[in-house]
Amino acid sequence: MIITKKFLPRRAFLRGIGATLALPLLDSMVPALAATSARAAHSPTRLSFVYVPNGMIMDRWTPATLGSNYDLPTILEPLAPFQDDMLVISGLAHNTGWALEGEGPGEHARASATFLTGVHPKKTEGADLRAGISIDQIVAREFRQHTQLASLEVALDSTEVVGTCDTGYSCAYSNTLCWSSPTTPIPMENKPRAVFERLFGDSDTTDPATRRARLRKDRSILDLVSQDVARLQNRLGPKDRAKLTEYLDSIRDIERRIQIAEDQSSRELPSVERPVGVPSTFTGHCKLMMDLQVLAFQTDMTRVITFMMGREQNTRVYNELDIQDAYHPLSHHQNDPSKIAQVLQIDILHSQMFAYFLEKMRSTPDGDGSLLDHSMIVYGSSLSDGNLHVHNDLPILLLGGRAGQTLAGRHVRYPDDTPTTNLFLTLLDKLEIPLENFGDSTGHLKLLEV
């Protein structure tokens, strides 16, 4: 065996005319004779937040027992393949989501604004917004030196036609979870094409006319870098060639699905749920956006992603579940068994989509393991009982190898009204970004510190 001690740089790209494409982590990016433990050091930690709106049917979410020998309740059953890697956390609250004296309604706006900030938002319908910097942006500031994008903010619902928002609160509070400063909300992107372009498009210009012209070209971005691919493959070993081929195939598949979605939607009248370029079904849209997130992590374009599976007061109609009523009104079921049954179907579907994302993360190689091994993933909502707008005993899951495996496979309960920001403060410590406090935090989650 001949060892040249040459290796590809970690931030290697395929370059062609008007296109730049990041590569996944390949064995060739690790110096020759590097030990397995050294390879692990080249696998960065990814941070992911996945949000579901309008609360949960909590008696079908919360395990009946604590510890490791618990039966999965109905909503968590789709996550059975990940039970041994999953921590179910009960008892956490967003106490800053409750109304202050005289504020009145606004539970949904406050739920969104507090989820990643732990800061009570200012009640205003004007431009004088105020909440707090969100945890994803704190981490993004630390991680941005290593990636092209500091963070990615992705959603499924369009904000172009927002429908109803809480009276007295700007829709900006409900349209995002992410704040770069107390007065600056970050827009979420729900169009797959726009996310793809942000990740893999022409970074030389942001001119809309130029971008539209490139979209009209009837050929794949990968065709522009084909010669570079051929040269690179000649330098790789069999394992890396197979990995690169699989990666390029996944890129082509996503491009194909985006093109199909655009072609299909162009034949239909625009609607709130199906703007041009967005798949017509919830599951198709959700899976495509999740695939893009996995690619963003795989290529190390970013290490921080926030995903809103739905915005608060979401009025989506889940036709694929044969449900004819809008989601948010259904969540105010007033203990009607038929409405509860429909909301339960939606909660289960959300879990199924999250399981899809986890499987993609687990099946994507990364260094000495998988993307899931090298991630921290928080899944949950800022409301528990959506019918009554309850901000405590929230439905929260923690997954990923970098989150710490001491309590994996368990259901733990903290004292009532423990701030959710205590969890975030603990995760920041694990990311080596120590803060004395965050939002309304009162300390760390002791069980997670080991």
Image (spheres, rainbow, N blue to C red):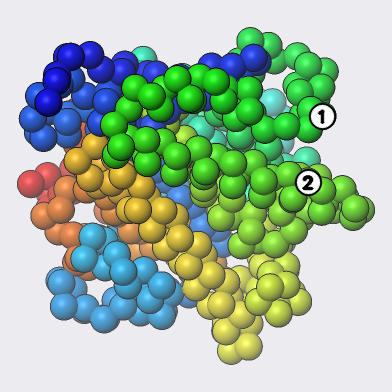
Element type where label 1 sits in the image: loop
Q: Quadrant of residue 138?
A: top left
Considering every residue shown, the one lying at the far bottom of the view is: 337
Nearest to viewer (mark 2 / mark 1): 1
Element type where label 2 sits in the image: helix
Residue in the foreground of this view, choosing between 312 and 342: 342
Q: Which residue is mark 2?
A: 262
**Position of the N terminus by quadrant:** top left
**Residue 448 position within the rendered picture, expressed as x and y whole percent measured from the top left:** 15, 49
Label 2 environment density (alpha carbons within 10 Å; few <14, some 14–19, many ≥20): some
Q: Is residue 356 left or right of residue 142?
A: right
Q: Which residue is mark 1?
A: 216
The kind of residue on which mark 2 rests is: Glu
Residue in the foreground of this view, choosing between 363 and 356: 363
**Residue 162 position within the rendered picture, expressed as x and y whole percent measured from the top left:** 75, 47
User: Which residue shows up at 57% across the image and 71% down it?
Assistant: 346
**Residue 325 position within the rendered picture, expressed as x and y whole percent measured from the top left:** 74, 74
| Residue 346 against residue 357 in the figure, above or below | below
Residue in the foreground of this view, choosing between 200 and 154: 200
Q: CA distance from mark 2 to mark 1?
A: 12 Å
Look at the image and tell me whether residue 320 can be seen. Answer: yes
Look at the image and tell me whether residue 96 can be seen. Answer: no
